[in-house]
Each structure stands twice: as structure tokens, then as C-alpha cells.
């Protein structure tokens, strides 16, 4: 009986030992599986963070690096956006080439290239975009012109009047004393503007902001400007309803800063766009046609007619109004250039046509002095070309 009990105890111990070994093996297998699972999950997480997350985060912000060209001729989306934006808002500073280096998480290094110059110098502008926030390393290059570079930004009167007639009306309307200045243009009075022109350096080039003596229709303006020997010309366009009181314009610009387009481009560009949606958007041709000379626009001929010029300007404004992320980045402190405001400008242009109150051109001292003596010109404000 004792032997049987001892054997039974040994069998039970054997069973317990085997059970414990089996449990231990199961635990070790479970830990190995868990370890492998954790390792795999960690690898997936690391790969996701390294390769996928930066792209996903970038999707929530403006992406300047998006290729709008093709596999043979890549073009960054910001190149097209900048070509349109600079034509509308930056007279004399038009750019259409932007190199972009994507760093992930909505961060990009950018270089806005200058591909054409009137001074013999090419000045590229570098900067960075951090999750929809743009910072140039030199903020002076792409400064917009002051709102008063043209005389019509600060006088009242009637559209058909000359500047002098409207200055007289302004003095009377606002009850300004005879010894008080009423011409608030950046150039000062006509005499002050002429004196400044006479003191310019003959060896340098300048952006000339030319205030017309009378507001012109586009047809009349184009006839006038085509007779001049000028480089690229940008025309300042009335884009909003005029404030009126007793049929008299109270403020020509309605507090809308200067907006316009290039009516005689000095160079073309090859950038792809949707011609059906934005007809005649940019002077030049689409990238797939750039090897065919017959496909390139003749900008001077194309923009001679008011209908083509209107179509071009409307396409510029429509394009910008549809680039919400880009526009929010470029105009974050300005409420005048929202999608709504730009659409209202389009409606105004379609209804009223193009009315030109001034223009800019890049020229030397001699050319600007010749312009200042013409009856169509009231005065000229200048900035040195950088």
C-alpha cells in the first residue's frame, strides 16, 4: 500500500511538473508573440512617423511643391500661383519660377527665382513656409506698392475730370484751406514730382508709377501706351464701385489698394493651367506645347483688344479667388483680398470694363522725364529697382 501511495505521489508530481512545464512554455510563447507583436507595431509606427505622417500633416496646409507639370517637365504649383499673384499685386516684380524643397510636416524651403531683369542683375528671394506661414529672408523685395503711389488714391471728383479739376473739387468738398496740401500722392505735388525726377541717377533703373491726368478706357489707354517706347507695362485698374454723393465720386479707389495686370509683357512663360476654366490666364503657352513656336502667344497682339485684356484680368482674379490656402498665406493681414472680395471685383470688371487710372513701367531717368512732359501724364512716383 505504501508503494502504491508513493507511486501515485510520483505520478502526481510528474503530472504537476509536466503541467508547469507546459504552462511555462505557453507563457514563453505568449511573451515571444507579444514581443514580436510589439516589435512589429513599433517598426510600423516608426515607419509611419518617418514616411507617412509628414505627408499626412502636410495635406492640411498649402503645398507649394505639388507638381503641376509632367514627368518630363516638373513645375511647382507655387510657380503658377506666384506668376498670377505677382502680376496682379506686384508691378515691376513679376516672378513665375519657384523652387521648392519639401521637409515634411508642412515645412518647405523655397526660392523665388528671377528669370528676367532690366538691370542685368538677377535677384532670387529665399524663404520658408511653415504649415501655411510664409517668411521671406528679405521682406523688401516683394513689398506691395503703397496705396498712394497713384494720385487717384487720395482725391475726390468726377471720372471725366483732369486731376487739377478734381483737386479743386477736393479742396472745396472737404473745405480745405488754401495753404493746406490736398495732393496726398507719394510723389507729392506735380512740381515736387518733377524735381525728384530731375535728381534721379542716370545710371540706375526705376519703377515709375505714372498717374494719368484722366482715367482712361482700356482701348484709349492701349492706343496711348503702344506709342511709347517702354518696357513691360502694368496698368492699374479700377476694381470696385465708386462711392458717390450727388453724382460726384468721393473716393476713386474706395479704399481698395492698387490692383492691375501686365498689358504688354516683356517675356513669356511656359506654365500649365486649365484653359477652359481660366482662359488666357498667362502670356505664353502650356508646358506640353512649349517646343512648338506656333503655340506661343504674341502678348502684344493678344492684349491689344479690350475683350482679350478683360478675359485675361478676370481669369487672374478668378484663379486667385480659388487658391484659398495660397491666398490666406499671402494675404493673412488683409481682408480686401478674400474670395468674396475678388469675386466682387470680377463682377465689377465684367459689368464696367477696364478703366485705367495709372500704370507702371521700368525705365531710366531720361524715359521718365519724357513721360512726365506728356499731356496724358499728371505726375510720376519712383522706386529704385532692386
Image (tube, rainbow, N blue to C red):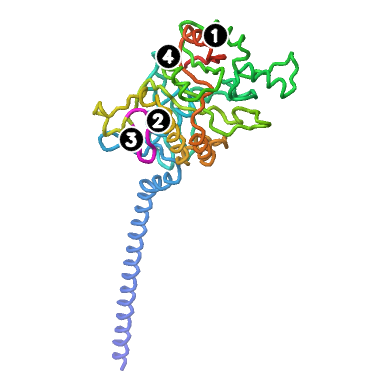
Looking at the figure, which quarter contains the N terminus? bottom left
Marks 4 & 3, CB-CB < 8 Å contact: no
Q: Which mark is residue 46?
A: none
Residue bearing the label numbered 2: 308
Mark closest to the chain's N terminus, 2 or 1: 1
Residue bearing the label numbered 3: 272
Residue bearing the label numbered 4: 227
Mark closest to the chain's N terminus, 1 or 4: 1
Q: Residues within 10 Å of mark 1 (few under 14, many from 20)?
A: many
* Label 3, label 2: how far apart the Cα atoms are: 19 Å
- Element on which disc 4 rests: loop
Q: Which residues are magenta?
A: 271-284
From what the image shows, is residue 81 above or below residue 191?
below
Closer mark to the observer between disc 4 and disc 3: 4
Residue bearing the label numbered 1: 197
Mark closest to the chain's N terminus, 2 or 4: 4
Q: Tell which of 99 and 367 is nearer to you.
A: 367
Q: Main secondary structure of the magenta part?
A: loop
- Report if residue 281 lies within the magenta region: yes
- Element on which disc 2 rests: helix
Mark closest to the chain's N terminus, 1 or 3: 1
* Label 1, label 4: how far apart the Cα atoms are: 22 Å
How far across and how far down the image is residue 158, in percent? 62, 25
Amino acid at each position: 500500500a505504501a508503494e502504491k501511495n508513493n507511486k501515485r505521489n510520483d505520478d502526481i508530481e510528474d503530472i504537476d511538473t509536466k503541467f508547469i512545464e507546459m504552462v511555462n512554455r505557453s507563457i514563453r510563447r505568449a511573451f515571444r508573440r507579444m514581443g514580436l507583436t510589439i516589435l512589429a507595431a513599433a517598426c510600423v509606427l516608426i515607419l509611419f512617423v518617418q514616411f507617412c505622417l509628414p505627408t499626412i500633416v502636410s495635406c492640411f496646409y498649402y503645398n507649394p511643391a505639388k507638381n503641376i507639370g509632367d514627368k518630363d517637365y516638373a513645375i511647382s504649383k507655387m510657380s503658377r500661383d506666384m506668376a498670377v499673384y505677382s502680376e496682379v499685386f506686384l508691378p515691376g516684380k513679376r516672378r513665375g519660377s519657384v523652387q521648392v524643397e519639401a521637409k515634411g510636416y508642412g515645412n518647405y524651403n523655397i526660392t523665388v527665382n528671377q528669370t528676367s531683369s532690366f538691370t542685368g542683375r538677377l535677384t532670387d528671394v529665399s524663404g520658408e513656409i511653415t504649415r501655411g506661414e510664409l517668411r521671406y529672408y528679405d521682406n523688401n523685395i516683394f513689398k506691395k506698392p503703397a496705396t498712394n503711389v497713384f494720385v487717384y488714391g487720395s482725391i475726390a471728383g468726377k471720372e471725366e475730370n483732369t486731376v487739377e479739376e478734381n483737386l479743386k473739387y477736393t479742396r472745396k468738398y472737404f473745405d480745405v484751406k488754401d495753404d493746406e496740401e490736398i495732393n496726398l500722392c507719394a510723389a507729392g505735388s506735380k512740381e515736387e514730382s518733377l524735381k525728384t525726377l530731375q535728381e534721379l541717377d542716370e545710371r540706375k533703373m526705376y519703377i515709375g508709377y505714372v498717374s494719368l491726368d484722366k482715367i482712361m478706357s482700356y482701348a484709349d489707354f492701349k492706343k496711348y501706351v503702344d506709342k511709347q517706347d517702354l518696357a513691360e507695362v502694368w496698368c492699374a485698374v479700377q476694381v470696385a464701385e465708386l462711392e458717390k454723393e450727388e453724382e460726384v465720386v468721393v473716393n476713386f479707389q474706395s479704399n481698395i489698394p492698387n490692383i492691375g495686370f501686365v498689358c504688354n509683357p516683356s517675356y513669356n512663360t511656359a506654365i500649365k493651367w486649365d484653359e477652359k476654366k481660366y482662359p488666357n490666364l498667362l502670356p505664353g503657352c502650356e508646358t506640353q506645347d512649349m517646343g512648338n513656336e506656333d503655340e506661343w502667344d504674341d502678348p502684344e497682339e493678344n492684349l491689344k483688344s479690350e475683350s482679350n485684356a478683360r478675359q485675361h484680368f478676370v481669369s487672374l482674379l478668378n484663379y486667385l479667388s480659388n487658391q484659398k490656402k495660397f491666398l490666406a498665406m499671402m494675404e493673412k493681414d488683409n481682408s480686401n483680398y478674400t474670395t468674396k472680395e475678388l469675386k466682387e471685383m470680377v463682377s465689377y470688371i465684367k459689368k464696367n470694363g477696364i478703366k485705367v487710372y495709372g500704370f507702371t513701367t521700368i525705365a531710366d531717368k531720361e524715359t521718365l522725364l519724357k513721360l512726365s512732359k506728356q499731356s496724358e501724364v499728371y505726375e510720376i512716383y519712383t522706386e529704385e529697382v532692386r
